[in-house]
Amino acid sequence: MCDKTYGGDSATGLDSKLLFPIERLTRLSKWPDICAFLQEKNLIVRPLSLDDYDNGYMELLSGLTRVGTVSKEDYVHRFETMKKSNEISDHYAIVVLVDQQTNKVVATSTLFLELKFIRQCAIRGRLEDVAVLESHRGHKIGKLIVQIIVELAREVYNCYKLTLDCMTDDLQKFYAQNGFSYGCNMLNIRFKE
Ligand code: 16G
């Protein structure tokens, strides 16, 4: 099962290296289906780990946008800041899919949790940084990682809505096929290219 390596495996010390508790994922009602799908593809799902810099996480993100120079030290510092922030209140749920054979991360997505005062102190979820390694595209892995984030936002973190922005018409179609609708206009000011 896909939780064999990471779920409750405190003996190996892996749990303490995860950005958020694995139990957040195992609580998903679709967890057995998710695991069955991943098992078929020889993949594992888990929260981002402190070690994922060495497992290709930055390379994976560079398939999405410009990553720039991020040293291991930069990665560890950012990871630890996110983890500390999660200890006060859940903010960063970064999920990765790992190839069991190579131990490389092959897909990722982030659920960012924004605390609000409106709607009786509600939580808004943002679906961010969805990336699938080119070699693993075309196997419905992107669809799966998006579904995991949707279920996490709904079932585990009790978000009142989940939003995203994306760059192309094709991506808009992809997200529309995965339950998103055109709810509002997204505008931005770019401070850096
Ligand atoms: C897309 C991503 C967003 C990411 C941005 C990076 C999704 C759903 N959206 O909009 O999360 O941060 O691309 O592009 O994954 P940028 O570097 O041009 O902002």
Image: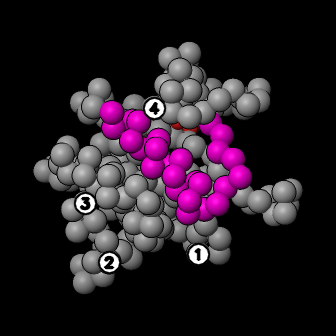
Q: Earlier in the sequence, mark 1 or mark 4?
A: 4
Q: Secondary structure at mark 4?
A: loop
Looking at the picture, which amino acid does disc 2 mark?
Gly
Q: What residue sits right under mark 1 in the picture? A: 87
Which label sits in the foreground, 3 or 1? 3
Looking at the picture, which amino acid does disc 3 mark?
Cys
Which quadrant of the figure contains the N terminus? Answer: bottom left
Q: Secondary structure at mark 2?
A: loop
Whether 33 is among the magenta residues is no
Real-space CA distance between mark 1 and mark 2, rounded to the nearest whole angstrom: 18 Å
Q: Residues within 10 Å of mark 2 (few under 14, many from 20)?
A: some
Q: What percent of the width, then of the height, locates residue 102?
A: 16, 49
Q: What residue sits right under mark 4 in the picture? A: 64
| Residue 183 falls left or right of residue 54 | right
Q: Earlier in the sequence, mark 1 or mark 2?
A: 2
Picture residue at 37% right of the left edge, 58% below the top: 31
Which label sits in the foreground, 4 or 3? 3
Q: Is mark 1 within 8 Å of ligand 1?
A: no
Looking at the picture, which amino acid does disc 4 mark?
Leu
Q: What residue sits right under mark 2 in the picture? A: 8
Res. 2 mark: 3
Real-space CA distance between mark 4 and mark 3, rounded to the nearest whole angstrom: 26 Å
Dots 3, 1 in contact, CB < 8 A: no
Range of residues picked out in magenta? 140-164
Q: Secondary structure at mark 1?
A: helix
Real-space CA distance between mark 1 and mark 4, rounded to the nearest whole angstrom: 28 Å
Q: Is mark 4 within 8 Å of ligand 1?
A: yes
Q: Quadrant of ligand 1?
A: top right
Which label sits in the foreground, 1 or 2? 2
Total labels drawn: 4
Q: Residues within 10 Å of mark 3 (few under 14, many from 20)?
A: many
Q: What percent of the width, then of the height, locates residue 124?
A: 71, 52
